[in-house]
Amino acid sequence: MNSQLELDLRQIVELDLVKSGDDKSMLWRGPAVLGGDGVAFGGAMAAQALIVAQTLEPERVPESIHTHFLSSVRPSESIDHEMEVLRSGRAFTVARVESRQAARHCVSSTITLHKPESSPEHQLPMVPLGQPETYPHSSFIPPGTAPSVRRCFEIREVHSDNGSGQAG
């Protein structure tokens, strides 16, 4: 396990399967990522929980994730993610991922995965946009964001055109 504080995106999302019991209980290990104020970045922990849940049925897509941050996480230590399948049906799978660090319960996530299926559309079509490279980089960085976290994101600014609904 990499204990460095600065990790690239690949290191964040590549988790190690530590224990595989039956199909309903597995233990994964991943790195904590330095966030602001010397604690781990919660978004990376939620993403890792989602990755763990999707190992169940990769063809299903995330429907929802509810994450509760229960205690702070030290970025210098790895995190263990234990997954339990709560329900697996024809269209939906619900899993709970409990994340611990040194036996201390830190994060609890409930994730619903859904089998893609055709259904009525209830939203307007997305406004056509250009390629991401055609838009300027955003210089905004939230206060307290560690450089290692900021490097994981590329933010581009897209502005609306006088409320006409056309971006550009």
Image (cartoon, rainbow, N blue to C red):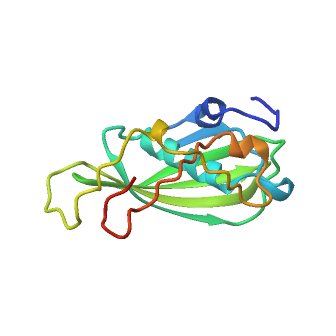
In-front residue for pair 20/130:
130
Q: Residue at x 14, y 52 (%)?
A: 118
Q: In this rendering, would 80 be left or right of 74?
A: left
Image x and y of residue 88, in percent: 32, 52
Q: In this rendering, would 21 be left or right of 98?
A: left
- Please, which residue is most extreme toward the bottom here? 163
Q: Which quadrant of the figure contains the N terminus?
A: top right
Examine the rendering and report whether any part of residue 22 can be seen: no
In-front residue for pair 113/124:
124
Q: Is residue 43 above or below residue 147?
A: below
In-front residue for pair 155/146:
155
Q: Is residue 147 above or below residue 165?
A: above
Q: Residue at x 50, y 48 (%)?
A: 50
How many numbered discs, if any?
A: 0
Query: Residue 5 appears in which quarter of the rendering?
Result: top right
Image x and y of residue 94, in percent: 39, 57
Q: In this rendering, would 126 be left or right of 18?
A: left
Q: In this rendering, would 90 be left or right of 5?
A: left
Image x and y of residue 54, in percent: 43, 43
- Please, which residue is most extreme toward the front here? 162
Q: Residue at x 37, y 56 (%)?
A: 167
Examine the rendering and report whether any part of residue 69 can be seen: yes
Image x and y of residue 26, in percent: 54, 41
Q: Residue at x 50, y 42 (%)?
A: 51
